[in-house]
Image: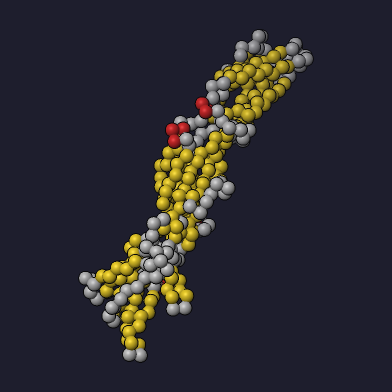
Amino acid sequence: LAGAVFELTSTADETFKKTATSDENGKILFEEIDAGVYTLKETKAPEGYTLPSEETLTITVEAKDGELGYTVSGNESNIWFQYGKDGENHLLKNSKTVDITIRKDWQDKDGKPLATDEMEESVTVELFRKVGNNDLTKESVQKNIILSAENEWTVTIVDLDSCGKDGVWTYFIEETDVEGFEAIYTEETEETTPDNIVLVVTNKEVVGSLKITKTVNRVDSEHGAAAFITCADGSVLYRTITFEGDIDTDITKSVTVADLPVGECTVEELTALRYECKSDVSQTKTIEADKTTEFSFRNEK
């Protein structure tokens, strides 16, 4: 790479500093250097690339066989990921920057696009990175990223490092919980390029069920016990349980209602002719995702 700026500093004389810029072959040349110990550091990366590391290399210039020569060393226990050696050539690598595009998709319980008026006004995500699958290297890159209809549910974070001294970064996102929806994280590989990674969080509507159980002490004619169900989204359903025959002992029947929005739900039993409700007439409970919430009522004739 051409255009990378390096600085050579003497460890014995802080006033001694020399800079050099890599040529079209990527080579850097410092001339007229006396014997001594120096540190080498890249101070400016070429446009579109990131600096290799905050670490420095040590250059030791000393007499060998009557001529000055040099050796290069680094932190052997934590050498630059972007540093290598090829024979007598010492290689310093610059990594390209990468943009991260974060997009939000909304789906209903059937996986179809969600109606606009059923979406949240906005959601908050946080961008993280780690080396490979090593959670110990996980670090936050940017918090409080707001996705909304105003920005078309898409935000791009630009000029991020593609790798650190330990290896190539893996970027991922986490979303603040959205009630009534599950978060599904994917990378759009067909849209991802070397310069731009597209990460998508899909909020899919989750649903639950409720079960209404009715017990009556006796039946001597057909009896329909009805209830109103007020769901978390404000919709109202009507269900009936019918008892028939001539029975002088407790009899129990149930009805299950599926695909209900999660959240608080109220079941209110309607007044039954010639039957008195011995339980709470109105009961409010929480519908949970992929679970069945039970409501029980008892009537006596």
| Spot occupied by residue 2 in the image (x, y as percentages of width and height) | 39, 64
> Dividing the image into 4 quarters, which one contains the N terminus?
bottom left
Farthest-out residue, bottom: 65
Relative horizontal placement of residue 4, taking residue 281 as reference (left or right): left
Farthest-out residue, right: 245
Farthest-out residue, front: 24
Placement of 123 over or under 53, stated as above or below = above
- Residue at (35%, 73%) from the top-left corner? 29
Q: Is residue 3 visible?
A: yes
| Spot occupied by residue 234 in the image (x, y as percentages of width and height) | 54, 22
Front residue of 80/32: it is: 32
Q: Quadrant of residue 8?
A: bottom left
Q: Quadrant of residue 84?
A: bottom left
Front residue of 67/181: it is: 67
| Spot occupied by residue 74 in the image (x, y as percentages of width and height) | 39, 73
| Spot occupied by residue 213 in the image (x, y as percentages of width and height) | 66, 24
Placement of 109 over or under 189, stated as above or below = above
